Structure formats: C-alpha cells, structure tokens
Amino acid sequence: MRSIITWVSIACFLITGCSTPEVTPLGKAGVISGNFQGVEKGAKIFLRSFNQGVLVSKGECLLNADGSFELKPEQPLSKGYHQIMISKRRPLVLITNHEEPIFISANVPEGRGYLTGATIYGSEASALLATYYNALIPLQDSLMNVSRELKSGNAENTGELQGLTKKIVEDLNNLSEEFVEANKNSPAALAGLENLNPKTYFRDYETVLENLREEYGNTEYFKMINQKYTMSKDPTKLKKQTKQQQVQQKQRNGKNSKYIAGDEAPDIVMNDPKGQVRKLSDLRGKVVLLDFWASWCGPCRRENPHVVHAYKKYYDQGFDVFSVSLDSDLGKWKRAIEQDGLIWDNHVSDLGGWRNSASQAYGISSIPHTMLLNRDGKIIRTHLRGPALDQELIKLFGE
C-alpha cells in the first residue's frame, strides 16, 4: 500500500512542478532525436501515428553505439498523438507536430511495457503527458498484479485483495481527475479523460473538450474521447446510424473484421526471414493479397497452394502477395516457406506468435485470414479463400 500512496504523491508533485530546463539539446524542427541507454547498439526506433484506432508507421531509425538517435518522419507529422517504440517493446507517447524539435533522454529497463522515467525536451505537452504516465503506469501494474492474484483462485486473503483493488481504482481515478483539472487547456488532459468514466466526470469532459475543440478537434485522439463522451450522454445515437453503417459496424465487430471493404489498409513494417525490412506500402500500385498465416496452422498450409497458383497466374499483371506469419520459431517459418513453395519476396514476421504486432493492429483472431487490396492500398474484400480468391482475381484480371 505504501508504494501506491508514494506514486500518487509523486504524481501530484509532477503535475504542479513540471518545468522546462534552461538548456535543452534540441535538434531540427519536426525531427525526433535523443539518447536511450540500456538498449543494444543497432536497435530500431520506430515512429507511429494514431489513425482510425491503429498505429500507422511514420518512420524508423537505428540506435547508434553511444545510444543516440535521430529520426526524421517520412512525412511531416500532423498535430496530435504519436508513439515512439524502442525495439518493439517499450512505447512512449508524444503529443507533437512538424514544428517542434523533440529530444528524449531515458534509461530503458529490460522487459516490455510503457517506458516511464523519460525526460522530454522541446514539447511541453509531451513532457506533461510523461509526468502523468510516470504516475499512472505503476498504479495500473499494481492493479493488474492484484487482479491476476484474485483470478488465480488460490488467494487465501481474497477479502484483503478485493479491498486493495478498490483502493487502487480510487487512486487511479483521483490521479486522473487531479491531472485533468490541473491541465484543462493541454492536449495531455485527453489521456487523463480516457481513464475516467464520462458519466461520473462529465464536467471534466465538457470543459476539456470545449477548451481543445478548436485546435485539436480534428485529431484522431480527440475524436475518440469526444465520441466516448457523446455516447455516454446519448446511447441511442447508435440506433440512428444508417442501415449501411449498421451493417459495417456489425462487420467490424465480427471475427477478423477490424477492417472491411473500403477501408485503407494500415501500413505494415516488419522484417523478412533475412532481417530485411519489408513494407506493405511499398507494394502500392499493385493488387495485393495480404495473408495472415503460420507454419503451425494446418488450414493455412492447405490454403497455400491456392495462393501460389494465384501468384504465378497474375504476378505479371500486377498481382503480389504480402504474407504476415504468426510464427515464433524462425527455423519452422523458413522451412514452411520453402516446403510450400511460397516464392514471393514479401514474407514478414516479428516472431511474436499471436502477439504479432501487425495481427494485433488488424484485430486478427484466427488464421488463415486474407485481405485483397487494390492498387491504392484500400481493401476490396476480406476472408478470401480457395475458389473465392480465384473468382475475385478473375474480376480484376480476367481469365
């Protein structure tokens, strides 16, 4: 219990005592640079932006031997929430745009989870947000640990753990409420709102959303928080959707259907078996079958001959395949590619198994799963297997 009280006290200090140092090692506007200690040389630093509920790649760089890095986005960043990911295991959220020069300094501990303790220069909103997460994450971790112990069914002190759960939830709400009320004019306050019930804290929602609407109303994160608040006031708005919207919503909530026909497929940036970076966006201009599979998946392996046939038949007409493997064993993945004759170049995986970052971003819950993309990267159809894939390709390319 002492650690929880300590973190809440630290949070109150950070919220009221945040200041910008007189000297900051800032670089060029729109460029994110910094120094990460505790990370291996050559580690990849990824930059992603929030877009329609997922993270879309915006650039990457390698960490130098001394821990320094400089990451220039592939395109100027729009105003809003973005994320730095260190070696695919330590995320850090930034609130910035193409005008601010960002410098981040941190000691990166082992393991996964959100990076706390980072010092951020050049962006007041990002630095403020960091103070909030520095206090929030330990509380959330404590709640997760207590919940895990309760669910194990082996806890002899169930009553005490239930009381502790209630206390941590209260601390989380108090922390978020205090942060929001102390920073009502900052976009960082949106993160605090996300952790508060809009029905209980409706006045905080109203104030912050009104304060930020003009400047941040078009950003993805603002829209998400605003929708959360709007639905809490009038749940019947869901019933006011058109029939087409209702069908689309049902499709999105269905199996493997976070994205449906007409949506733009978010970019996937991942390594192939040789360690070379492959990007889904590099195939723009081609019709692409995005294929989620794994060497251990029997139905996937049985489907592979159909995909190989389609690739050989239509490749010369502008068809290609981008295969995302949910394997965790490099050797088994490579052997399956060879055994099944998967002769296209674009095979990627982060060897995370079901935790594959692309499959999670796309909401994949079972494999095989395919999406056929047009030359602009938009989804034509999903769930294409066997004859259904052949028929769709005939429509596009002919017999």
Image: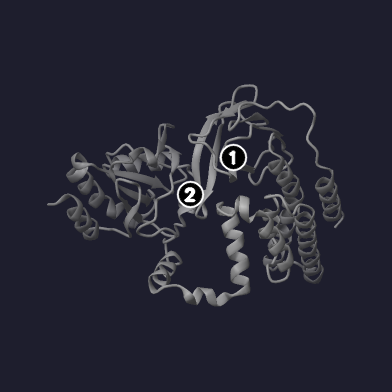
Say the numbered circle drawn on residue 97: 1
Left or right of 123, for residue 15 = right
For marks 2 and 1, give the one nearer the viewer: 1
Query: Which of the labelled discs sits on residue 245, or is there none?
Result: none
Q: Which residue is more in the foreground, 34 or 363?
A: 34
57 vs 239, nearest the viewer: 239
Residue placed furthest toward the top = 65
Give the class, few, some or many, for how many residues have Cα within 10 Å of label 2's Cα (few <14, many ≥20).
some
Q: Residue 386: where, in percent of width, then height?
A: 24, 58
Q: Secondary structure at mark 2?
A: helix
- Indicate which disc, 2 or 1, sits on the residue closer to the N terminus: 1
**Image location (x, y in percent) of residue 282:** 36, 37
Residue 210 image-quadrant placement: bottom right
View extreme (left): residue: 399
Q: Amino acid at mark 1?
A: Asn
Any part of residue 272 in sight: no
Residue at 26 percent across and 42 percent down: it is 341
Mark 1: secondary structure: loop
The residue sitting at 19% across, 45% down in the picture is 314
Q: CA distance from mark 2 to mark 1?
A: 34 Å
So how many labels did they put on this image? 2
Taking the spot 72% from the left edge, 48% from the top edge, the residue there is 133
- Vertical order, 321 against 41 (above or below): below
When asked about the image quadrant of residue 78, the answer is top right
Please say whether residue 97 is visible from this viewpoint: yes
What is the x, y in percent for residue 370? 34, 54
Along the line of sight, the residue nearer the viewer: 16 or 394 = 16
In x, y percent, where is residue 4? 82, 55
The circle on residue 353 is 2
